Image: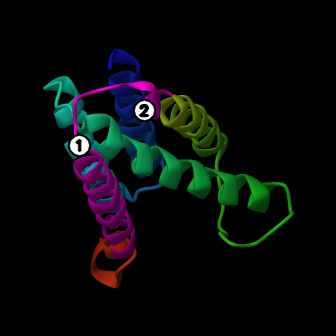
Amino acid sequence: MKLITGCLLSVILSLLVVGVVSATLLRHIVQITPVALALIATTRRASWSPYAALPLFVFWLVIMAFIWLFLLGVATIVSGRFTPIEIAMTIIVGICSLVGARASPRITSGTKISVKVLTFLLFLALQVFAMWLSLRESIAHA
């Protein structure tokens, strides 16, 4: 559980750094809200917390992969300008997401499969909603 906690915390801190560097702190605070909720659950050792963290790690790993594909000139799923600090943070988020995604399903608990699936789906939905919300005009340019 400590590994998952450390990975979640690293994702949060890295995304906050990006928010500060890019002057989009509010956008990134909104984006990390589900990650912060999963972090609270893991620090409290909730039996379902690895299944809250897993979809978040997968989500952020996919977002980082889209950024890397853009930076490599392979695809334009995402676009923009990325400073060296932001690029470094994508590497940290990507590594922590990969490590966290591999560690999460390995933690066994007495949690029912239905709770695991519902937790996974709930946190995936929360993360997608947070990303959508963070891209709204009122938040994106605040």
Residue 127 horizontal/vertical position (percent) = 35, 60
Mark 2 or mark 1, whichever is nearer to me:
1
| Horizontal arrangement in the rendering, residue 75 relative to residue 101 (left or right) | right
**Quadrant where the N terminus is found in the figure:** top left
**Disc 2: which residue:** 104
What kind of element bears circle 2? helix
Residue 52 seen in render? yes
Q: Quadrant of residue 15?
A: top left
**Disc 1: which residue:** 112
Q: In this view of the protein, which residue sits in the foreground, 111 or 88? A: 111
**Label 1 CA crowd tier, 10 Å (few <14, some 14–19, many 20+):** few
Residue 51 in magenta stretch: no
What kind of element bears circle 1? loop
Question: What residue do we see at 18% from left, 35% from top?
Answer: 41
What's under tag 2, amino acid-wise?
Ser
Residue 141 seen in render? no
Question: What residue do we see at 22% from left, 37% from top?
Answer: 111
Residue 109 horizontal/vertical position (percent) = 27, 27
What's under tag 1, amino acid-wise?
Lys
Start-end of magenta stretch: 103-132
Question: What residue do we see at 35% from left, 83% from top?
Answer: 137
Mark 2 → mark 1, Cα distance in angstroms = 16 Å
| Horizontal arrangement in the rendering, residue 76 relative to residue 88 (left or right) | right
Pick whichever of labels 2 and 1 is earlier in the sequence: 2
Q: In this view of the protein, which residue sits in the foreground, 92 or 97? A: 97
**Label 2 CA crowd tier, 10 Å (few <14, some 14–19, many 20+):** many
Q: In this view of the protein, which residue sits in the foreground, 112 or 127? A: 112
**Quadrant where the C terminus is found in the figure:** bottom left
Q: Exactly how many numbered labels are in the figure?
A: 2
Question: What residue do we see at 55% from left, 28% from top?
Answer: 99
